[in-house]
Amino acid sequence: MFTHFRSQIEKMELIPASKGAFEVTINGQTIYSKLDTGVFPVSDEMIKQMEAMN
């Protein structure tokens, strides 16, 4: 997943959380929340969402 956007990612940050939180936010927009879905994201689906943002 990370090599797919290697030339476009300026900063990647991991922020520790509790209670099973796993959220992916791009430019202030949350594109995935494990708290909402209850499951971890599928990489291919995440890539498609990121591509749609370009």
Image (cartoon, helix red, strand yellow):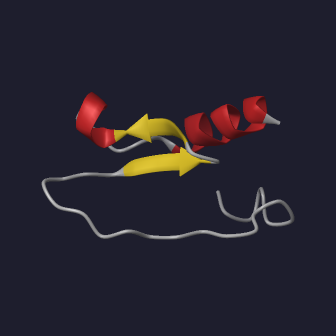
- Quarter of the image for the C terminus: give it: top right
Q: Specify the quadrant of the image occupied by residue 33.
A: top left
Q: Position of residue 32 (x, y in %)?
A: 45, 38
Whether residue 29 sits left or right of residue 9 in the image: it is left
Question: Considering depth in this image, is 28 or 40 the residue closer to the camera?
Answer: 28
Residue at point 75%, 33% (across, down): 53
- Quarter of the image for the N terminus: give it: bottom right
Residue at point 75%, 29% (across, down): 52
Question: Considering depth in this image, is 52 or 13 the residue closer to the camera?
Answer: 13
- Tell which residue pokes out farthest to the left in this image: 19
Q: Position of residue 41 (x, y in %)?
A: 43, 41
Residue at point 12%, 54% (across, down): 19
Residue at point 75%, 63% (across, down): 9
Q: Position of residue 28 (x, y in %)?
A: 57, 45
Q: Would you place residue 18 above or below residue 34 in this image?
A: below
Question: Considering depth in this image, is 41 or 9 the residue closer to the camera?
Answer: 9
Label total for image: 0
Q: Specify the quadrant of the image occupied by residue 7.
A: bottom right
- Tell which residue pokes out farthest to the front in this image: 28
Q: Would you place residue 23 above or below residue 6 in this image?
A: above
